[in-house]
Amino acid sequence: MTDPRSQSTYQVRLAWGAEGLDDLAAAPVVVIVDAIGEADDLAARAAAASHGPAVFVASLRNATATARAVYDVQTTSGGRTAINLVLAGDDGRFAVEDYLAAGALGDALSALGIDHTAPDLAVATEGFRPLTRALKHLLSASTSGLALADDGRRDEVRAAAELDADAEATRVAG
C-alpha cells in the first residue's frame, strides 16, 4: 500500500514544511506557500528535486496569479498535472496565515477547474472562503503577525494580507 501521507491519489496535495515536502508523492509542480516571510530554503529544496519540478512561491498577495501559472504548466503538459502545495509554516509548524494562503490558492485553482484536491486542501479552501473579509485581522492576530508587530514590522503584515495585490506569480525553478 502507498503511504497515505503521499496523497498520491489526489491531483492537488497539501503538506507542511520540509518533512511534508518529502512525504508528498513527486509532482511536476510544487508551490511553496508562505504568507508572511520568506521560504527560500524550502523553495531551494523543492527546486533541487531530481525530477525537476516547476517551483513557485505563493502567498495571499499572488494566489490567483500563481493558480493561473500552475494552470499554464498543466495546459503546456497536455494532461492533468499533480500539484504539491507545501506550507512553510512557522519553523515547519502550523501557521494560520499559510493555511489561509493555501485556501486562497485552492479556491483560485478550483475556479480554473483544478479541483481534485486532498481533504487537507479542501478544508483550507472552505475555511478561506468565508474568512476572506477577515484576512487583515487574522494575519495581524496570528502568532507570526503579532511577533512581527512587536518587531516594528506591522506594515509587512498588513501588506501580506492584501489578497491578489500582485498580478505575477513567483517562479523559482523549472
Image (spheres, grey):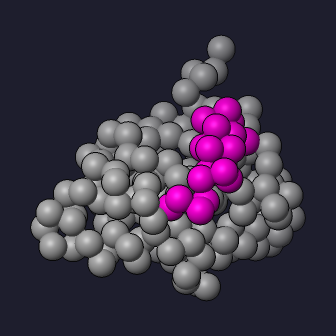
Determine the residue positioned at 71% across, 56% down: 107
Please give left or right for residue 84 compared with residue 151 in the image.
right
- Residue at the far top: name it: 1
Query: Furthest-left residue in view?
Result: 151
Q: Residue at x 30, y 78 (%)?
A: 155
Q: Position of residue 40 (x, y in %)?
A: 32, 66
Is 12 inside the magenta-drawn segment?
no
Q: Is residue 112 above or below residue 19?
A: below
Q: Quadrant of the N terminus?
A: top right
Residue situated in front as seen by the camera: 11 or 139 = 139
The image quadrant where one finds the C terminus is: bottom right
- Can residue 58 be spotted in the picture? no
Quarter occupied by residue 19: top left
Q: Residue at x 64, y 38 (%)?
A: 123
Nearer to us in this view, 29 or 61: 61
Residue 113 location, x and y as percent? 86, 58
Residue at 61% across, 60% down: 132
| Magenta stretch: dominant secondary structure | helix
- What are the residue bounds of the magenta stretch? 117-135
Horizontal side, residue 29 vs residue 80: left or right: left
At which x and y percent is residue 83? 65, 52
Please tell me in which quadrant of the rendered image residue 149 appears: bottom left
Residue 170 seen in the figure: yes
In the displayed structure image, the side of residue 164 where residue 118 appears, left or right: right
Tell me residue 171's x, y (percent). 53, 75
Above or below for 42 versus 7: below
